[in-house]
Image (cartoon, rainbow, N blue to C red):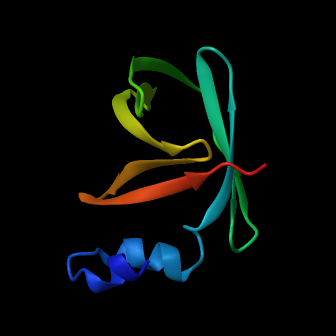
Amino acid sequence: MSELRANPNTPDNVLMCFDMKLCGHNMILQYTDTQWRQITEFENGNIFTSEFVDYEIANTSESKVLFKTEVDGVLRETTYTILDQDNISYYVELDGFRWKEYLHRKH
């Protein structure tokens, strides 16, 4: 968060998301061989459950996995970087601003 606040180019709506405690969250991914959805519990206690969307694993390597999904008719590609057994990262883009998110597996 400090990196986002220190960047003068960070859009107000991105900062507002964190200020309203809607960005830091716990997320559960439910998936089958061809579909996934996320269930997100935000810091303010609200819970959001997405619809299932089709996905495809387009490419894998020792440290990266490229997923392709189609949401509302728009093809999206996201590369997840495997940091270690319990941690991955990926980039999020909102209104042309990009930042890195980290996910930690809960045991």
Query: Residue 65 at x, y = what percent?
Result: 43, 29
Q: Residue at x 74, y 51 (%)?
A: 106
Q: How many marks?
A: 0
User: Is residue 68 toward the left or the right of residue 45 in the image?
Assistant: left
Query: Residue 19 at x, y = what percent?
Result: 52, 83
Q: Nearer the viewer, residue 13 or 35?
A: 35
Query: Residue 97 at x, y = what percent?
Result: 26, 62
Q: Nearer the viewer, residue 86 or 31?
A: 86
Q: Residue at x 43, y 32 (%)?
A: 72
The residue furthest top is 33
> Residue 59's image quarter?
top left
User: Is residue 100 toward the left or the right of residue 54 in the image?
Assistant: left
Query: Residue 15 at x, y = what percent?
Result: 41, 78
Q: Residue at x 43, y 39 (%)?
A: 80
The residue furthest left is 9
Q: Residue at x 58, y 70 (%)?
A: 22
User: Is residue 89 toward the left or the right of residue 42 in the image?
Assistant: left
- The answer to whether residue 98 shows anywhere in this view is yes
Q: From what the image shows, is residue 21 above or below residue 29?
A: below
- The answer to whether residue 51 shows anywhere in this view is no
Q: Nearer the viewer, residue 31 or 80?
A: 80
Q: From what the image shows, is residue 4 above or below residue 67?
A: below
Which quarter of the rendered picture does the N terminus lie within?
Answer: bottom left
Q: Nearer the viewer, residue 59 or 78?
A: 59
User: Is residue 66 toward the left or the right of residue 6 in the image?
Assistant: right
